[in-house]
């Protein structure tokens, strides 16, 4: 595994020949494109919601009718993505630096989203729910523990890039107070 740049493809090449390697490679491409698509759409709509709630970022909360999209939010998101690519280009580890920066942000998001589920279900126990979480509260608590560990790991083992990512997240705390 240490000598392989594509472990899954190499494994399936041994099991199923070139057809197996091609199949798993195409499967990885489809999964990656789907993930990128979901990230772009949800990222822009999150920025759009921020623009709706926080007056400082009102420009992100505009919806253009012709392409029927939050164009300003997409453009800001593209600028942030290009800045991350630039950061990766000018550092020694490249892609690793981008992952170091973004990993704790994702774990923060998953952790706080799940905590919000628990808090809202506690505060409003009789509110109608369109979806019931199986084995509630066990599954959300287990997920919080895993996210907390992965957040901790991303901070401890990655270094300065992760710390910079956390600082950027923490800079958003005053925006929460402004929108509340």
Image (cartoon, rainbow, N blue to C red):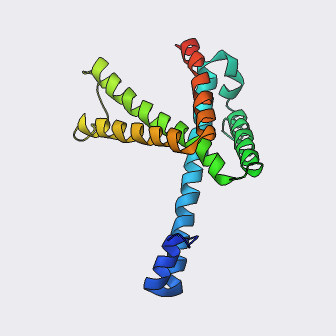
Which one is nearer the viewer's eye here, 146 or 92?
92
Q: Is residue 153 left or right of residue 6?
A: left
Q: Quadrant of residue 78?
A: top right
Across the whole image, how many numbered discs are drawn on residues?
Answer: 0
Image side of residue 162 versus residue 112, left or right: right
Name the spot of residue 82 as percent of width and height, x first: 74, 45
Residue drawn at x 63%, y 38% as measured from the top left: 160
Q: Residue at x 71, y 49 (%)?
A: 88
**Drawn side of residue 30 relative to residue 87, left or right:** left
Residue at 59% over, 18% down: 175
Whether residue 80 appears in this view of the structure is yes
**83 is higher (above) or lower (below) than 27:** above
Residue 48: x and y in percent read 62, 30
Residue placed at 52% from the left, 60% from the top? 31
Corner quadrant of residue 76: top right
For the view shown, which residue lies furthest in the left direction? 135
Image height of 173 relative to 34, above or below: above
Residue 132 picture location, percent across and down: 27, 37
């Amino acid at each position: 595994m240490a000598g392989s740049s594509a472990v899954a493809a190499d494994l399936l090449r041994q099991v199923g020949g070139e057809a197996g390697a091609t199949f798993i490679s195409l499967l990885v491409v489809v999964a990656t494109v789907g993930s990128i698509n979901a990230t772009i759409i949800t990222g822009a709509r999150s920025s759009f919601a921020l623009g709706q709630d926080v007056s400082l970022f009102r420009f992100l909360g505009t919806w253009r009718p012709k392409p029927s999209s939050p164009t300003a939010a997409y453009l800001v998101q593209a600028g942030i993505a290009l800045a991350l690519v630039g950061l990766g280009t000018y550092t020694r580890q490249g892609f690793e630096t981008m992952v170091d920066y973004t990993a704790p942000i994702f774990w923060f998001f998953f952790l706080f989203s799940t905590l919000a589920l628990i808090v809202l279900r506690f505060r409003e126990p009789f509110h109608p729910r369109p979806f019931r979480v199986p084995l509630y509260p066990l599954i959300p608590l287990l997920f919080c523990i895993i996210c907390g560990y992965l957040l901790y790991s991303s901070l401890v083992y990655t270094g300065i890039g992760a710390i910079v990512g956390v600082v950027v997240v923490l800079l958003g705390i005053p925006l929460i107070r402004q929108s509340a």
